Amino acid sequence: MGGGSAGRPAQGLLAEGPGRTVLLFGLVAVLFVGTGMTQSWNTTLAIFNMGLVSAIMALGVNMQWGYAGLFNIGVMGFVALGGLAAVLVSMPPVPGAWEAGGPRMLLALLSGAATVAAAILVQKRMPRGKLRVLAVAAVLVGGFVVYRSLFDPARDAIEAVNPAQAGYLGGLGLPIVLAWPVGGLIAAGAAWVVGKTALGLRSDYLAIATLGIAEIIIAMLKNEDWLARGVKNVSGLPRPVPYEVDLQRNPAFVERVSAWGFDPVIASSIAVKLAYAGLFALVLALLVVAAQAALNSPWGRMMRAIRDNETAAEAMGKDVTRRHLQIFILGSAVCGLAGAMMTTLDGQLTPGSYQPLRFTFLVWVMVIVGGSGNNLGAVLGGFLIWWLWVMVEPLGQGLMGIVTAPLPDGSGLKAHLLDSVQYMRLFTMGLVLLLVLRFSPRGLLPER
C-alpha cells in the first residue's frame, strides 16, 4: 500500500491486498472441502449453509460497527424478529383462532398504537410544565386500560383454540421467500424505535440498551402464545426447496443419481442443501455488492468520517444522529433478513434457542476476526468462525481421547479432561480472538 500505511500495526506474515483475500478465502474453502472428504458432504453443506446465514449477520453488524462505530449488542433481538416474520408470512392462518379473537386482537393492537401516538402528540403540542406531564400520563393510563380490556379476552380466546397444535393466529400462507424481506422490514421498524430512543446515548449505554431491548423481544416471543405459540414452538414451516422424500419418489431423480452411482437418499439430502446454498449465496452476493457500492460512495465516505471524528463531521454540517439512525436501521434490517433465512433453513421457530452467546457474541467475533469495516472480512469471519464453532468440539473430543489414552480407566484426571471437551468451543473462540487481536489487530482482512 502507499505511504499512508506507515506506522500501522503489523498485520502478520500476509501482506494486505487482493492476494491476501484470495488466500484466506481459499484456506477457508479447504476447511470445508476437507470436512466433506473426511466426514460427509451432507455435514459440510449443513455447516456451509449456516455459514452463509452467519456471514449475512456479520455483514449487518459490520455496517453498524465498521461503518459508523455503533456498538449494538442486541443482534439477537433483530434476528429473532426475522424468525417471527417467517411464521407470520408463511404459515397458514388458523380459522378457529381468527373467529374466536382475531378482530378483537387487531382492535387491541390498534388501540395500543393509537395510545402511543396520542401521547406523543400531546407531548409535542402542549407547553412544558406539570399540566403536560399530567396530560401525557392520563392518555397513557387511559389507553392502557382500554388496551388491556380488549387484549386480554382476545388473547385468552385465541390461545384456547386447539392449544396442542395451534393456539395462535397463524400467518398469511404466502411463499416463505417473501418472509425474508419482510423480516428485514420488521427488524428495521424495531431499529427505528430503538434508534430514536437510544442512539443519543454514549456507546456503553447504547450497548446496554440494545441488549435489554433484545431480551425484551425474546421474552415477548416466549410468552405471547397467540403470536407464535411461545415456547411451544412453530414447526413445519413451508420450504422454498423440494422435500427430500419428494425427490426420492421422483423416478427421474432416482434414475439419474443411481446412474451416477449415488444413493438416492443421500443424494436427495445433498440436492436440497445445495438448493438452499444457491438461494442463500445469491442473497449474500447481492448484499455484498450493495454494501460495497454504498461503502465506496460519498455516503460511505461520510459515514467513515463520522465514525472517525464525530466532532469534525458535525462542524462540517453533517447530521450525525440522523446518519447513525440510518446505518443502525440498515444493519438491523440485514440481521432480520438473516434471521428469516435461518428460520426457513431450520423449518421451525424456537424462541428458546435465541441466546446472546450464539446470536450476539459469536457474530461480533466474526466481525472482529474477519476485519471490521471490510465487508469481505465480515463474510470471511462468518464462514471461519462458524466452521470452528461446529467442528471444534468433535475435533477436541478426538484430541482429548489421544491425550488421555495413557491414563488408566477410572482416573479422575482422565474423566475431568474428557468432561471438559464441551468447553472447547468457548476456549477456541477466546483463543482465536486473542491471537487475531495480538497479531492482526484490524482483523484478517483489514479495512483499506
Image: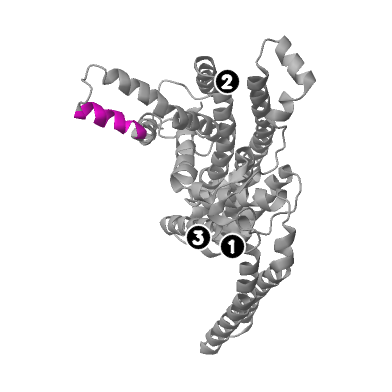
Whole-percent x, y for residue 236 in the image: 65, 43
For disc 2, the marked residue is: 41
Give the residue displayed 54% in from the left and 29% down from the top. 47
Real-space Cα separation, disc 2 to disc 3, in angstroms? 39 Å
Q: Which of marks 3 and 1 is in front?
A: 3
Q: Nearer the viewer, mark 2 or mark 3?
A: 2
Residue 317 visible? The answer is: no
Q: Is residue 255 magenta?
A: no
Front one among 255 and 434: 255
Inspect the image, locate mark 1, and give the three-letter code of the amino acid beneath it. Val
Q: Does the magenta stretch include residue 419?
A: yes
Above or below: residue 8 compared with residue 73: above
Front one among 264 and 356: 264
Q: Are there few (<14), some (14-19), or many (20+) residues within 10 Å of tag 1?
A: few
For disc 1, the marked residue is: 193
17 vs 174, left or right, is left
Secondary structure, mark 2, is helix
Magenta stretch: give its range.
Answer: 412-422
Which dot marks residue 173?
none
